[in-house]
Image: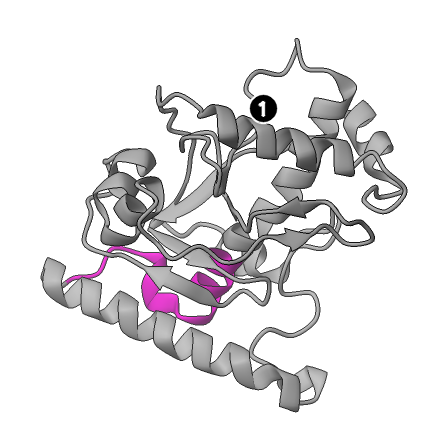
Amino acid sequence: MVACDAQYRFTFVDGGAFGKEGDAGVFSRSKFGAELLQGCLPPLPCAPLPGTEVLTPHVFVADEAFPQKINLMRPYPGSQQLSHDQKVYNYRHSRARRIIENSFGILAARWRIMGKEMECSEDTAEEVTKACIVLHNFLAKGDQDLPEESRYIPPGMADRDGAPGEWRRIVEGDTNLTRTRRITAARATQDGMAVREIFKEYFQTDEGRLEWQDQHVRRGTLHNVGIEFN
């Protein structure tokens, strides 16, 4: 179970769970997940949405396997009955979630030991995975000081507005990456839904909208799937 920032660097890692376990269960049993869900983590101060004075909490973006909380956003459930504004929110939510999928993909493409089952003990496999992630973060952080052709994450490695990233070609055929869509029955909190409504409305304003978002929604290009290591 991991979280990442906008530069494809992992900010939280909790390893050791079995691949068959549901994402929400693994998350709730991890120390970070339990403290986040129980409100034990020191909250960051609310910040205004860009171009407005509307204050919102800082949130993590997750898929529909996770519960809706004031600091944890999931997409609106369903598809046929959603309003246009809700579909726009889901599209924008999906764009944000694509960062973690790219982070996993780049990690697997750069560290090829991640592409198949490791022939070692579970403890060793966990340590190898953590070592790869530390090296991934170190090299990704140094990219800003390097010319494009020498970067750990060069242009084109990650997905860009419909164009698949180069990492997808590299990991094609790997046996250790699977797409998942495990659903949880966890109920959304009222405060969490209220925060999601604020984001939904912001994406319809001049300050928050993307000029192509309506076109994507009409084409139905929403992708709410994830990628994980087994």
Residue 126 horizontal side relative to residue 129, left or right: left
Residue 77 location, quadrant:
top right
- State whether residue 193 is above or below residue 156: above
| Magenta: main secondary structure | helix
Residue 206: percent from the left, percent from the top? 90, 42
For the question of whether residue 43 can be seen, the reply is: yes
Q: Is residue 41 magenta?
A: no
- State whether residue 164 is above or below residue 11: above
Q: Is residue 111 magenta?
A: yes
For the question of whether residue 230 can be seen, the reply is: no
Badge 1 is on which residue?
76
Q: Residue at the location (70% across, 82% down)?
A: 148
Q: Residue at the location (35% across, 19% down)?
A: 185
Q: Nearer the viewer, residue 162 or 216?
A: 216
Q: Nearer the viewer, residue 59 or 124?
A: 59
Q: Amino acid at mark 1?
A: Tyr
